[in-house]
Image: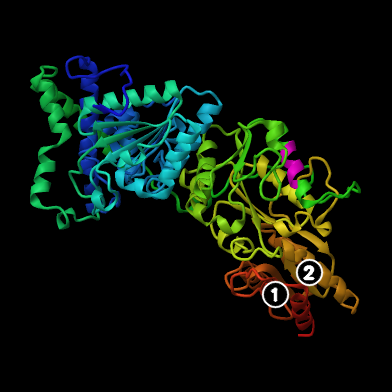
Amino acid sequence: MKVSQDIPVHKTFTIKNTDKAILEKWFYLMTLGRMIDEKAPNYLKQAIGWSYHAPYAGHDGIQLAIGQIFNRENDHLFPYYRDMLTNLSAGLTAEEIILNGISKAADVTSGGRHMSNHIGKPEWNIHNVSSATGNHTLHAVGVGRAIKYYKGKGVAISSQGESSVSEGYVYEAINGASTEELPVIFVFQDNGYGISVPKKDQTANRKVANNFSGFKNLRIIHCNGKDVFDSMNAMTEAKSWSLENQQPCIVQANCIRIHAHSNSDRHDLYRNEAELGYVQESDPLLKFKRMLVRYEKLTEAEIVAIEEKAKEELKIAHRNAMASPDPDPASIYDFVIPDPYPATKYPEGLHNSNGPKKKFIEGLNETLKAEFRLNPDTFIWGQDIANKEKGGIFNVSKGLQKEFGIARVFNGPIAEDFITGTANGMSRYNKKIRIVVEGAEFADYFWPAMEQYVEMTHEYWRTNGKFSPNVTIRLASGGYIGGGLYHSQSTEGALATFPGIRVVYPSFADDAAGLLRTSLRSEGPTLFLEPKALYNSPTASTPIPDDFEVPFGKARIRREGTELSIITYGNTTHLSLKVADRLAGEGFNLEVIDIRSLIPLDKETIINSVKKTGRVLVVHEDKVFGGFGGELAGIIGEEAFEFLDAPVRRIGSAFTPVGFNRILEAAILINEEKIYAAAQALLKY
């Protein structure tokens, strides 16, 4: 084993000094694992399942070692799709692995909802990871942050192939773990290929881990991932290092890939016969078997007995898995998102307070502080949110770090993926944790985090209800500030298309406070969009009762009317109210519905309004084409068509980016005159 720093090794495993019972256990696990690995393709051939299988043969040493050093009581393990032996070594049974492979309802990973070969057991802290390769490194860092904050006794272990290290978020994860000095072990299982792409096309360094050799607070250990003892020594030392120093470590394990990348890959098209012959001859299982006999640790008869025992376990596991029920098609709507905090104090999200008016930004700031006081397991981070008296670009989080300290309120790097992904990870540590992140300084900059956003939306469904990130993602959205590109776009039309996340967009200070409180008290993720043009607007200022709550999925009738329903939210709520007042002076009676919550949506209030008025104008700041208004119009057309006296009309901004010059911005964004003209046309229809 080659170690990058001269650190004493706490325990050294060799064939000579390792107890026979341990060697028997290891050989049994390796034999059973290989039998499952070789049997997996047969399920596909028989049309039973396992349509995705990534063989692990050639990674035997490092995968055995990862599982053996993992402690389910204190550690958190993030295996990747090739980590079958890792999971078996960590304690999963052959039956559990087969149930995953053939996607049965009893699959402990996901109940058949996730791809085969994506194995985990969330109740043991073996996490169900994404198919987006390397994506889970950020989750491991988030867990590492929680372990350190709560003074846990474990480490977070992230395992992956060497090619996934090319992903930017892997760099962000390792950089973050190094900066924050977190107990995270990153294992790179290097077999030389990313499907068919050789390593030389991925990185200039022969050893990918050496790309990170300049990082401070980071230990790098190289080992032979084919060799059981070198791998055990490397993983033991890595864990000791991370526990004692509370710092990250990379273990680069040199492996071979004996078979194709997966069952859909033809590796004979890019690997020559000499290479294919070499990897077969270098089989780690056969080498370990020979060593056990050569050093007289096990006899040939004992070897055969262990192999027969593994065959029998596999036979029983197969029989039980085949008899296990398939998932119920009726279950597809289970576990899309957890039930929210009930918000029973103000069940309709309404109040009659006559107290002093507070600005939108005050409502957010005071609610954050109140919830931080209520729940000591609440955290917030993002860019620029915790620097002396500064609280983000718009000062929403001003004063939080001063009151609650740097461990709970801190700055993140300029890396939106990292900010969002580590929130997902940290929330895994326990269900009491509530996290608020400024996903980006402006909603327009959130796009680098989209993969982590999508990941967050399907965690609850994918884990069959075993885990959901308790995270509120705040984004300052919309225009009317002269911000131009990247400071004025509306993004909810795209972000609301993913099942598994709540999306809210308040228009007034009280709703901002109430919806934020409900978000922070709920399980599951919420996207909290804030129209930044209203932060300090007098028209958005309202009285806010103490402990005000607004339930999700409850629209607010801002103005009662009988002749035309305007369905709106955000900045355009205020424009629509002005238009309604203006048309009232002309003898028309308009109703204005502020939906507040896009997902879940209060269809009942909308449809009841349509029944009353017979005419509908959907107004939002976003572009009409592809905007959320299309969903509103579609629902009204399907469920309230018989009550309509005119076509549903949608109006929004021009189908262009939002320009910087104020003249261009005014021409592009929806405004009062455009709404007025559309409303007049509908009233006259």
Residue stretch in magenta: 364-370
Q: Nearer the viewer, mark 1 or mark 2?
A: 1
Tally of marks: 2
Query: What is the number of the mark on residue 663?
Result: 1
Q: In which quadrant of the rendered image does the N terminus lie?
A: top left
Q: Secondary structure at mark 2?
A: helix
Disc ID at residue 576: 2
Q: Foreground residue, 63 or 661?
A: 661
Residue drawn at point x = 74 percent, y = 43 percent: 365
Q: Is residue 349 visible?
A: no
Label 1 or label 2, whichever comes before in sequence order: 2
> Residue 200, position in %: x, y?
24, 50
Taking the view exactly as shown, the residue that stands out farthest to the front is 214
Callout 1: helix, strand or loop? helix
Badge 2 crowding class, 10 Å Cα cut-off, few under 14, some 14 to 19, many 20 or more, is many
Q: Amino acid at mark 2?
A: Ser
In the rendered structure, does residue 513 fall within the stretch colored magenta? no
284 or 462: nearer the viewer: 284
Image position, residue 291 (x, y; %): 12, 24
Residue 79 falls in which quadrant of the image? top left
Name the residue at 8% across, 21% down: 294
- Report the side of 649 relative to 583 (left or right): left
Q: Residue at x 58, y 49 (%)?
A: 439
